Image (cartoon, helix red, strand yellow):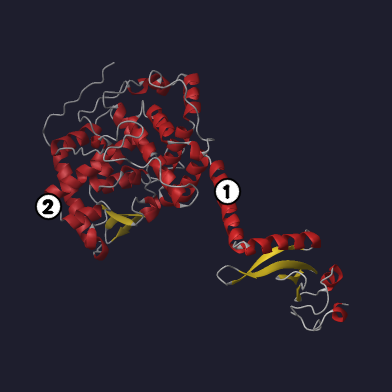
Amino acid sequence: MAGENHTGAARRGTAKLHGKALTLAIIKAMQPGDELADPEHPGLRVRCKAVGTGKQQVFFYRYRNSAGALRQVEVGVLGPMPLALIRSRWQELKDSVRNGTDPREELKAAKAKAVTKQRAAKVKQLTVGDVVEQYLAESVEPSRKAKGADETRRLLAQLIRFASWVADQKARNTAAWQRRRGKLPKDLEDVADLPAVEFNLQRAHELLLAFGSGAPRSGGMVRQELRAAWDHAIGSGRLPGPNPFAKQGKKDKLGGAALVANSKRERVLSKEEAGLLLRWMAEPRTYSRTVRDALELVLRTGLRSGEVCEIHSRELERRDGVLWLNIPGGRMKGKADHSVPLVGRAEQIVLARMPDQAGYLFPDKTGKAPLKQKVLGVEVYCCSGRSKAKAYEARRVCPVADWAPHDLRRTARTLLAELGCPYEVGESILAHTLPGVAGIYNRARFEEAKIEWLTKLGEELDRLTASKAPLALVEATA
């Protein structure tokens, strides 16, 4: 037994073998916790470790580097390496120490190099589609409302598979294809499966140019999302920086022209236009009743059109004689709960639309889901005089030109200001966060003030609607 072959074997951890060569038999007889030095190979030691129900003998080399510091490096494990090979490796390590090399530092450098190589391989395997999907799943979808997140996903998916999208549009001879056919290069390729490190500035520029050729606004939006996706990949350590698509200088030239400065709408209906629109909407052959009611509620409450379309009967509550709409934070752009008093004509519209059973006040055709916000914009466009759709040929053309549903919210805020509504109350009505310190410390709900000023807004709109100004209806041309 080992106890008969070397001194002190009865106690675990003995590190020196007296008068004996370290044989294979002695090594195999070691028990977990034993440690022996090889007298014929200075610095070479073996330690027995418990592994599961068995044991393992690990050899390591202890030495002093050129600075005199005591170091230790593993040589090998008996079994995978025969004893002769372990001692041969020890000789190599000993020679390197004699020549001024530190084996432990060499091992650390080799491991670091292997890790770097492995990371580089992973980066090379990371595709453009992977970068986009990680950005959507980790950044966009957790932080944006479902509608905005879905639109971002649609835009990016279309961009990275733009060649396939174009081929599909061409096969179906769609209006989108007809609009873009003369502007698209012939050598388009999908980039979804392209290694992300190979998707360079030139390829991105050419792809964005093609993508935005017939839809410049979409091109500008998808460019911003692509840049953000690369920022996310770099920030999470999946791609090396810097971002190749980072904006250079004041003007953004990636993918062609920058987003036009006037893309941010500032249209506000005048008082005369607001009254004219309300009177016109009440006439036959204009908007459907659902669209008319939704648009009028936007104007009378200052709500966003999407917030109006999704009103549910469970959000309505009468308090102290006033009908309140309590919108949960999940439906609001700012993620905070918002309450709006429904007074005058706004209350009449809501009560007239209340379903017999709990449900949406503006349901879609199925009756199970809310009306999509885009339906409002479609009807406004189709009665603008610009639409060629046969389904709207019988509709009258709206006498108020160049406006969109969201402009009604801006008009409501402007009318409130003109009526003398205090700034804080007006911003609260629109569910805007007050800027600066006021936004942090002013937590007032302004409930009484909301009732007062939305009542005044409603009365002003009623006065404008009742105006005797002529209603100039323009018939749609064939």
- Of the image marks 1 and 2, the number of the one nearer the N terminus: 1
* Residue receiving disc 1: 117
| Residue 464, numbered circle | none
Image-quadrant location for residue 396: top left
Q: Residue at x 80, y 63 (%)?
A: 83
Left or right, 302 with respect to 360, comes to left
For residue 377, above or below residue 53: above
Q: Residue at x 32, y 36 (%)?
A: 291
The residue lying toward the viewer, choosing from 198 and 64, is 64
Whether residue 365 is visible, yes or no, is: no
Q: Position of residue 15 (x, y in %)?
A: 74, 78
Q: Which element type, helix, strand or loop, lies under badge 2? A: loop
* Residue receiving disc 2: 420
Q: Residue at x 31, y 58 (%)?
A: 318
Closer to the camera: disc 1 or disc 2?
Answer: 1
Q: Position of residue 354 (x, y in %)?
A: 36, 46
Image-quadrant location for residue 26: bottom right
Q: Position of residue 228 (x, y in %)?
A: 40, 45
Q: Residue at x 15, y 56 (%)?
A: 422
Question: Which quarter of the rendering shows the N terminus?
Answer: bottom right
Q: Amino acid at mark 2?
A: Gly
Left or right, 449 with respect to 478, comes to left
Q: Amino acid at mark 1?
A: Lys
Question: Which quarter of the rendering shows the C terminus?
Answer: top left
The residue lying toward the viewer, choosing from 184 and 103, is 103
For residue 26, above or below residue 445: below
